[in-house]
Image (cartoon, rainbow, N blue to C red):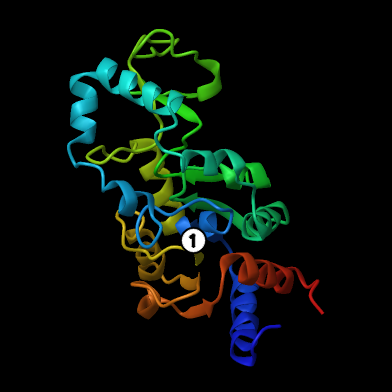
Amino acid sequence: MLGPDLARTLDLAAAAVRQARYVVALTGAGVSVESGIAPFRGPGGIWTKYGEPSPLDFKRFTADPRAWWESRVADERENRRPEWKDFERAQPNPAHIALARLELTGVLRHLITQNVDGLHARAGSRRITEIHGNRYRLRCLDCGERFPRHEFTFEQLPPRCPPCGGVLKFDTVMFGEPIPPDALRTARAEALRADCMLVVGTSAVVHPAAELPMLTRQNGGVIIEINPEESALTRACHLSLRGAAGVVTPELAALVEGVRD
């Protein structure tokens, strides 16, 4: 059962969403955590356990792609990072499903995610920008084309782009690697177009994602945060909904759609 303060704020948030012309969502690790995927930072985080990647990672990859790929393939074959199995087991949770439903009904126009797990697409979202990439895809460093990872056997390393022959890497963005220009352009354009942004399950401290809500706000848009705790973004938000994404997002979606008692 929702507390009275949250219920009142939910009513205000639903009214703001219904009045908006163009609603965009920005999601972060807090959404994936509720599907059983460990965060990168903080208690239980992958980087907390294994150490944060070096800022030279991308430079090392480009200097010797074959060596990087050989090490990564060995890691996966020997199961050196058991947390990777979390991605295989994870299923979309109610937050993913609620956001997909808002898109289906025409309320949500675009979804920008920092997550690399592909769960938004599996839940049914279609208009997605994955600014940190997708772990189930490979991306060509020359032409930028993306390919499903399962299409490659990795018998020859590094894998090569079928159309242009360029070196392929995981689509996920490495430390020291620029955000792919197409993803960054789309994310910024959507943030500027939005007159309402839902910020769900993110601390809003990692750039360039952290700048996106501010682009919407500076353009006169309303910022609605869904997060269990206060974040770096909270003071800039018009409304903050305190609670788990998997609980609060479906409640908000139901109110917007007018189906909640």
Residue that badge 1 annotates: 30
Where's residue 14, x and y in %? 64, 76
Does residue 79 sit above or below 83 in this rendering?
above
Where's residue 154, x and y in %? 44, 14
Q: Is residue 256 left or right of residue 50?
A: right
Where's residue 236, x and y in %? 37, 76
Label 1 packing within 10 angstroms: few (<14), some (14-19), many (20+): many
Identify which amino acid the numbered label 1 is placed on.
Gly
The image quarter in which residue 165 lies: top left
Give the residue drawn at x 39%, y 7%: 156
| Front residue of this view, candidates 220 and 247 | 247
| Circle 1: element type | helix
Does residue 1 sit above or below 112 in this rendering?
below
| Front residue of this view, candidates 71 and 228 | 71
Number of numbered tags placed on the structure image: 1
Give the residue drawn at x 59%, y 77%: 13
